[in-house]
Amino acid sequence: MSETSGIRDLLKKIEEETSGFKESIVSKLESIIEEVKISNKAVEDVEKEIETTETRIKKYDEQITELKEKKSNLEQAVKNLKANVEETNNKIIELKDKISNIKTKLEEANEELAQLKNENEKKKEELEELNEKVRQLEEEVTRIKKANEEEFAEKSTGLNKIREELSSLVKENAVVDFILAEGSYTTPEVEILTILFQTKVSSIEEIKRGVKVPPVMTVRTIKKLAEMKILSYDESTGQIKLLL
């Protein structure tokens, strides 16, 4: 009788340890699933931010190209104006030999020269403003690229940490290994197993209401998991029980 009692105590202790181990697995799996969802959302946000940043950079690049073209045109205009100034000065020298019309032609030449100088000064100012805008835009593009690279590196570090935790759990639990082997963290297998880890026993109707895929795919997935001895499925009663 004493030996039987010892065996019962041993079996009870084993059952308690197994129950605690299952609870620990359920907790870890739920935590991992939640972290993966958060990480996927973070990656989506980063990708959206990168796409927005790339759009802004493209816009700035287009503006820079346009401003550079304007700069080139203005530089050419300045050169042309300088040539006109030189040509006007030559006319003034030639007009000095023409005494009869010197005053009239000299006044006209001086007015033309003054106008050209004013235009030249305005073009120089516009050129300086454009150069400053180009410099500011180039600095902004550099800043955005740097900030984008730093943020992406930070997000990548967080994802690598989650992958390391998942790899550690794979070595400890066959169910986690199965989920990872499916290649997706939003498959119906994961949703079904998550429900069963919480309830242990459920019905086919409860499972159908708890997952996002169509009922036909839900039933097919449950039969697949039953064939793999991960759960049991009684088609006559609709009862589903986790075997792990």
Image (tube, rainbow, N blue to C red):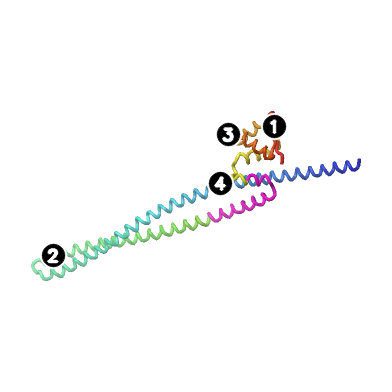
Mark toward the start of the polypeptide (4 vs 1) = 4
Mark 4 touches mark 1? (CB < 8 Å): no
Mark 3 touches mark 4? (CB < 8 Å): no
* Magenta segment, prevailing SS (helix, strand or loop): helix
- In percent of width and height, residue 221 lies at 62, 37
Task: Pick the residue in front: 205 or 74.
Answer: 205
Identify which amino acid the numbered label 2 is placed on: Lys
Q: Nearer the viewer, mark 3 or mark 1?
A: 1
* CA gap, disc 4 and disc 1: 37 Å
Mark toward the start of the polypeptide (2 vs 3) = 2
Q: Is residue 22 left or right of residue 129?
A: right
Q: Is residue 205 magenta?
A: no
Mark toward the start of the polypeptide (1 vs 2) = 2
Q: Residue 214 — which label?
A: 3
Q: Nearer the viewer, mark 1 or mark 2?
A: 1
* CA gap, disc 4 and disc 2: 77 Å
Q: Nearer the viewer, mark 3 or mark 4?
A: 3
* CA gap, disc 2 and disc 3: 93 Å
Q: Is residue 236 above or below residue 86?
A: above
Q: Is residue 167 magenta?
A: yes
Mark 3 lies on a secondary structure that is loop
Q: Residues within 10 Å of mark 3 (few under 14, many from 20)?
A: few
Start and end of the magenta stretch? 152-179
Mark toward the start of the polypeptide (3 vs 4) = 4
* CA gap, disc 3 and disc 4: 24 Å
Mark 4 lies on a secondary structure that is helix
Mark 2 lies on a secondary structure that is helix
Task: Pick the residue in front: 177 or 48.
Answer: 177
Identify which amino acid the numbered label 4 is placed on: Lys
Q: Nearer the viewer, mark 2 or mark 3?
A: 3
